Image: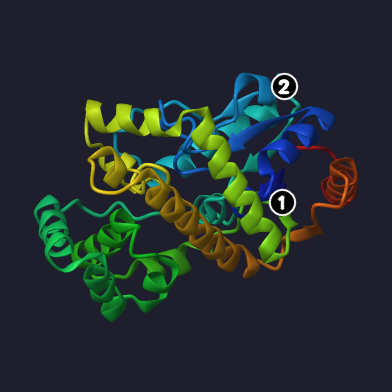
Amino acid sequence: MDKQFVAVICGPTASGKTGLSIELARRFSGEIVSADSMQIYKGMDIATAKPTKEEMQGVVHHLIDFLDPCDSFSVADYVALAHASLADIAARGKTPFVVGGTGLYINSLIDNISFDESENDYEYREQLRNIAREKGNGCVLEMLRSVDPVTAEKLHENNLNRIIRALEVYKTTGRTMSEQQSLSRQTPSMYEPCMIALDYDRETLYDRINRRVDIMLSDGLVEEARRFYESNDHPTAAQAIGYKELKPYLFGECSLEECVEKLKQETRKYAKRQLTWFRRDKRIHWIKADQERDFSRIVEEAADIISDNLKKYTETYGIFH
């Protein structure tokens, strides 16, 4: 079957995905489908580094800022909406871009990983949440590791919702999430991806992260976090890096300086986990980026990669899909 071409700009937080993708989308008459699990939520603007209207430079963005933080949203929900967005973009003759740092979203979409329609077990979920409250998230992750070590290896203990869902899937279906995903991969993907990420040395990336946190604070991150905790203690907000680290300050338990240092540390850890995820994908073209390399040269190299892949795609399928 003919596959649909899609450019994917991925990688760790603070690596410059937004700026690069917007420049490329302008050049290739493209539209962007976000692959960020937090930018989907309304109001969570500064903490998630959501691009502003000015930063978008007229490039159409999909799956950003459309969901209330109280609403539940699964990976399967994301894949369904992203499929529809990509089909719509291609149907209008535009180049589709998938941009973000949520590796699970990207791989589930690009590799056509389907999701089971298992029953929900709300009572079991609450039991697991009680265990997490009493013994810590790590205890629930170990429960998952005992039945599904493959999935457990991919999840951090902070990602409690995904851990609980994986245990719930096993309880309701008798099959692990990793088994289901492996079986689902037997169906060929509908996409021909061209995947690009920016490659920094660790010291430079961590410096970018620290500076980004400082900018977020000057842009009003503390006030944004305060609004969320005052309006409701959303489970989603409690997961978001940038809110949970500031909570002790907002409730008078720690100084702002201590919380900011914790925020920078947790963001660096998150970037490290993202890098571990994306390094496993051998399809990704890593473009060397550092403080001395001009951004325009990075854009040119990325554009050349996309042009080469588009040429190969056209030679294979005859037309652009």
Q: Is residue 303 left or right of residue 263?
A: right
* Quarter occupied by the C terminus: top right
**How many other residues sit within 10 Å of disc 2, few (<14), some (14-19) or many (≥20)?**
few
Residue at the image point whose x is 66% and y is 57% from the top: 205
Above or below 211: residue 114: below
- The answer to whether residue 4 shows anywhere in this view is no
Residue 142: image location, x then y, percent: 27, 76
Dot label at residue 204:
none
Q: Quadrant of residue 90?
A: top right
Above or below 194: residue 61: above
What is the three-letter code of the residue carrying label 1?
Glu
Residue at the image point whose x is 46% and y is 28% from the top: 220
Residue 79: image location, x then y, percent: 48, 44
Q: Identify the residue under disc 1.
A: 192
Q: Is residue 69 left or right of residue 111?
A: left
Q: Is residue 44 left or right of residue 14?
A: left
